[in-house]
Image (tube, helix red, strand yellow):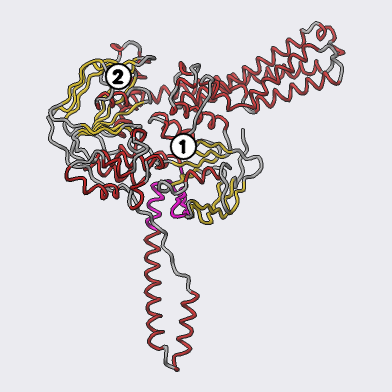
Amino acid sequence: MPIFAAPMVSVSNISVQFGGEPLFDHVSFIINDKDRIGLVGKNGAGKSTLLKIINGIHKADEGEMVVPEGQTIGYLPQEMEVQSRQSVIAEASMAFSEIVEMEKQIKILELEIHSRTDFESDEYHKLLRRQSDIYERYHLIGGSSVHADVEKVLIGLGFARSDFERRMSEFSSGWQMRVEIAKILLRQPDLILLDEPTNHLDIEAIQWLENFLVQYRGAVILVSHDRAFLDNVTTRTIEITMGKIYDFKANYSGYVEMREERIESQLATRENQQRQIRQVERFIERFRYKNTKSKQVQSRIKMLEKMDVVEVEGTDESSIHFRFPPAPHSGKIVLEGKGIIKDYPQRRVLHSLEFSVIKGDRVAFVGRNGEGKTTLSKIIAGVLEYEGELKIGHNVVTGYYAQDQAEHLNPDLTVFKTIDEIAQGDIRPRLKGILGGFLFSGDDIEKKVKVLSGGERSRLSIAKLLLTPANLLILDEPTNHLDMRSKDILKSALLQYNGTLIIVSHDRDFLQGLTNRVFEFREGGIREYIGDIYDYLDQRKIRELSDLERNAAGPKDSQPENVSASKVIYEKKKESERDLRRIRNQIERSENEIEKLESSVKVLEGMLAEPHRHEARIKDGSLYREYEAMKSKLAAGMHQWEHLHNELEKLL
């Protein structure tokens, strides 16, 4: 287990120039050993660059990074190309390179010891000591629990056991990134740097990652546009704005409040100071030429020269601002699906779906990645073939934002030309104004799409949606690459939108209050919940408890249909207490067994250390075989003990 010390990393007077402008201007801060830091700022402020500097990938133009010797850092970039040909579990196990190497050494030593007959020689005893040292180190760093740890993290991040032996190349880039996250978590570095990790995760995996990071023994720095994720994990927020940083000892929501209070205080102090300056300047102007007041005038001039003018923190308020055009009138039934089936070569994703969407509905599609959310979105948008019947209501006009919408833009067109191609009628003279609302102004509108950042491409894709009024909006992960302010503006526009909305998203804060129905995709089907995302999460917990209770009770007809939530929770609590007692008793028995095995191993080690007294058993190999068997039992006992403790942690 790594040993953590404070401070871990010191960032001292770092400056970075980008395009002739200061990205960082003499920035300094310290990362302490259990810090949970959220790194925030608008797109392009330098968050990702700062992570790369901390990780040693980039170097600052000025200043220095101080990382104590022996400190380890794990870094997940926003995007990376994974080219592994291994299975999922083999790739994840690469996190334990030291353990893998030690297992190789153990096998080599075992072969060499078995082949030796010089039991009384110094070389033979050195081999035994070397083997003992490696065994001790192997168990100390958790070698016996490696496979259990790997499985636990992979399952937490959304993989099924049936996925473990599949090749990495069979998975999408998003799922491959999950394996990279798993490797970082399994290595347990002193400092974890995660750049937009939730882009690759669904709601269940995000919640699991939250719990892992909250309990993690090292320090964590997150870049994320998921406010709920930041609020649940971080206790400190560092804002990057206009080349400077501002450090707040609070999570994201606390930072927003504290920043507003600080700016209000600074404004009040500055106003008082300016009032004082004006009074002094009036005195100087009035009595400048009077000899009797010359000393007072000179005194006040010097006072002004020495005065430190109060500065107000720069507030970057740039963000997209727009409203969706009024939705054309449509029929009451917007969508009706009957027996919708979708097969891919590997598996059936949608199994005979039955659903309907009424005019004015605001529906969230949620569920694990790969369960069919995007597939059904594409079917409704008319870009994917399927089996079954999908009825589109009277006068329904669809606007569709695909998850990879930004990738479908023509890279050789300019920003202006991209939307000029589809603009019609009276809207054409307003194109520059629309682009300005999405932060494209001046020379920006003549940039080619291929040089735009991910956030800029997303904003341009959303701008295109405005050009064709629609009464059914289908948005698949529209907040990816958008900064906090832009997300807030988009949410505000959607709240004012008067059409029907279907939105695929894993961003709980963005979805909160935005929808009135939730479709959960699971095992090829849909389960409907009434309310927004947090209503769904609450109801789902109760449903899962009810399912557990029914399973424990046996056949369905032996359990009453209407079990109250409070009774279910009470019964679940009793079951949990029974499980705790059972696990603790098993741990106690396991510890007693380990003590006996350790004693037996010590006795055998003493016998091996005196070969002249046990020559016969050493020559026929029976003493060594007994020793190896006892060591194997001890290793198995330790593995079982660790497994029981993992089970105990889950219940606590």
Q: Is residue 138 magenta?
A: no
On the image, which quarter does residue 469 sit in?
A: top left
How many neighbours does mark 2 have within 10 angstroms: few (below 14), some (14-19), or many (20 or more)? Answer: some
The image position of residue 128, as x and y in percent, is: 78, 20
Residue 52 visible (yes or no)? yes
Say if 424 sits above or below 202 in the image.
below
Task: Give the left or right position of residue 105, taking residue 473 as reference.
Answer: right
Residue pointed to by mark 1: 78
Which callout, 1 or 2, points to the residue nearer the camera?
A: 1
Residue pointed to by mark 2: 525
**The magenta stretch spans which residues?**
234-261
How many neighbours does mark 1 have within 10 angstroms: few (below 14), some (14-19), or many (20 or more)? Answer: some
Residue positioned 44% across, 53% down in the render: 241
On the image, which quarter does residue 515 sit in?
A: top left
Q: Amino acid at mark 1?
A: Gln
Residue positioned 24% across, 25% down in the render: 382
| 508 and 640: which is toward the camera | 508
On the image, which quarter does residue 426 sit in?
A: top left
Image quadrant in which the N terminus is located = top right
Mark 1 and mark 2 residues within 8 Å of each other at the beta carbon: no
Q: Secondary structure at mark 2?
A: strand
Task: Give the left or right position of residue 382, taking residue 302 as reference.
Answer: left
Q: Amino acid at mark 2?
A: Gly
